[in-house]
């Protein structure tokens, strides 16, 4: 029983054992990220069937493929400020509803233009979901296990991408490509009742917005397995801010330089990852490997990334996280240089691709766990979502530049060696983000009575 005293919410969460409800929250967020991964990857698996069914060219279908990444940017940029104003829970639920319902609607389209519009709307929902799961989980995970819990959540993305591939392989021959989209959209909608019932609002956000102690105590007690008398005062230690507007905080003194450094890190990391995963099979096939071998070797990147994410998160909780992330990016730079050196026909190819995935995806996922703690509660979702949104331009650029370099005649070794440059820049930028001092000594924000 806790009564008659001021309770700092973060310190309270950090000082207690992790409750079953906190692990349930990890599972709920994991399922959302899994559904997100399914619907991000889904078009890659149904595209060949659609192109054949509709009798259109690959360039004509490019409009559909590029619509969702644009929506991801819009969704990420819009979701953060909305979450910091409205709350994490309902923005997250709305985003899951959007990408579920629009994925199902996409199954009933009959032209590339209709499909492109719906994929844009789907992307908005997808882009809004990821930063809100990250932010909400970070605010209930104790500091000593925060990175590990967030990186475990993010492994759901790779799982979802793989699951929709297996589902497509099973459904398309029997029921056609439209059934895959219906399946991919139905699963997120199934999650919504669970989210409404079980997802908590952020207690720290409630405190900075002046919610009643009774409401905060009910939410915090439910998640942490504690009981309160109703006489407590809940506080959140926050740095003094020149503005309460979330977007303004990102560029205010003490935060602006750090924000730019995080954007550069995320941009460079996604550039490397998307160029590798998007063009590596083609590069290996052009170098002489079979299609099957190229696909199997590329899959090693995703396997390495899943393992790397968990291990990087685990190490981040034990030593300075920025150094761990920087070391992983540098490891990725060395791996792609190694790939350029040995060539596509080397017997060590699969091992080095695995190592590159381990380092690059591990670092990128670790960055998702690092970023929330760099911003105050009032702008945390905005800080995370804008980092993700700006980083998405790196994924778009990486996908595009791969095709351009191939068109210019660049070969396997040259393209892989070039990727060491953005990987190294990411390693340097994260250290800049770590050194940026955000804010002055903390002040208390107290929940209103």
Image (tube, grey):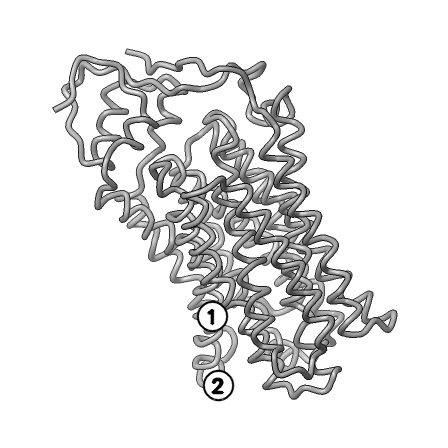
In the visual, does 357 lie left or right of 281? left
| Residue sitting nearer the eye, 302 or 203 | 302
**Image point (41%, 36%), residue name:** 88
**Image point (49%, 36%), residue name:** 372
Q: Whole-percent x and y of residue 141?
A: 35, 39
Image quadrant containing the C terminus: top left
Total number of numbered discs in the rendering:
2
The tag on residue 69 is: none
Q: Whole-percent x and y of residue 68?
A: 61, 56
> Which mark is first along the chain, 1 or 2?
1
Q: Whole-percent x and y of residue 364?
A: 56, 51
Callout 2 secondary element: helix
Q: Gap between marks 2 and 1, in whole Å? A: 18 Å
Furthest residue toward right: 408
Q: Judge depth for marks 2 and 1 and give the one in front.
A: 1
In the visual, does 132 lie left or right of 206? right
Q: Residues within 10 Å of mark 2 (few under 14, many from 20)?
A: few
| Residue sitting nearer the eye, 350 or 401 | 350
**Image point (15%, 28%), residue name:** 227
Q: Residues within 10 Å of mark 1 (few under 14, many from 20)?
A: some
In the visual, does 139 lie left or right of 306? left
The residue carrying mark 2 is 173
Image quadrant containing the N terminus: top left
Image quadrant in which you'd find residue 211: top left
Q: Whole-percent x and y of residue 250?
A: 60, 27
Q: Is residue 104 visible?
A: no
Callout 1 secondary element: helix
**Image point (39%, 42%), residue name:** 146
Asked if disc 2 and disc 1 are in contact, CB closer than 8 Å, the reply is no
The tag on residue 162 is: 1
């Amino acid at each position: 029983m806790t009564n008659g005293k001021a309770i700092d919410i973060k310190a309270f969460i950090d000082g207690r054992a992790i409750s079953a409800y906190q692990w349930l929250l990890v599972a709920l967020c994991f399922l959302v990220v899994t559904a997100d991964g399914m619907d991000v990857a889904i078009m890659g698996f149904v595209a060949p069937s659609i192109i054949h069914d509709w009798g259109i060219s690959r360039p004509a279908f490019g409009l559909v493929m590029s619509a969702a990444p644009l929506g991801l940017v819009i969704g990420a940029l819009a979701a953060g400020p909305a979450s910091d104003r409205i709350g994490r829970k309902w923005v997250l639920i709305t985003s899951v509803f959007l990408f579920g319902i629009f994925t199902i609607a996409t199954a009933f389209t009959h032209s590339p233009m209709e499909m492109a519009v719906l994929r844009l709307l789907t992307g908005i929902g997808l882009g809004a979901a990821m930063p809100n799961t990250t932010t909400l989980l970070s605010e209930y995970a104790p500091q000593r296990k925060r990175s590990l819990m967030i990186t475990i959540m993010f492994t759901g993305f790779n799982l979802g991408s793989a699951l929709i591939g297996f589902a497509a392989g099973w459904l398309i021959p029997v029921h056609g490509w439209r059934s895959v989209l219906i399946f991919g959209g139905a699963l997120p909608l199934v999650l919504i009742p669970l989210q409404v019932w079980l997802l908590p609002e952020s207690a720290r956000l409630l405190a900075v917005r002046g919610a009643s102690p009774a409401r905060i105590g009910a939410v915090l007690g439910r998640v942490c397995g504690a009981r309160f008398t109703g006489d407590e005062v809940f506080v959140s230690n926050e740095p003094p801010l020149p503005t309460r507007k979330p977007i303004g905080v990102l560029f205010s003194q003490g935060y602006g330089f750090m924000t730019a450094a995080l954007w550069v890190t995320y941009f460079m990391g996604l550039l490397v990852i998307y160029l590798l995963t998007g063009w590596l099979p083609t590069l290996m096939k052009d170098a002489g490997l079979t299609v099957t071998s190229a696909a199997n070797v590329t899959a090693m990147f995703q396997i390495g990334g899943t393992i790397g994410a968990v291990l990087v998160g685990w190490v981040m909780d034990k030593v300075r996280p920025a150094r761990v992330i920087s070391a992983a990016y540098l490891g990725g730079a060395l791996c792609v240089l190694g790939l350029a050196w040995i060539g596509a026909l080397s017997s060590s190819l699969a091992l080095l691709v695995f190592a590159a995935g381990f380092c690059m995806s591990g670092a990128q996922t670790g960055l998702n766990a690092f970023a929330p703690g760099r911003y105050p509660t009032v702008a945390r979702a905005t800080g995370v979502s804008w980092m993700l949104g700006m980083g998405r331009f790196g994924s778009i650029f990486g996908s595009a530049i791969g095709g351009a370099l191939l068109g210019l005649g660049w070969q396997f070794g040259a393209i892989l060696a070039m990727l060491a440059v953005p990987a190294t820049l990411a390693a340097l930028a994260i250290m800049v983000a770590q050194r940026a001092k955000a804010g002055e000594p903390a002040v208390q924000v107290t929940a209103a009575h």
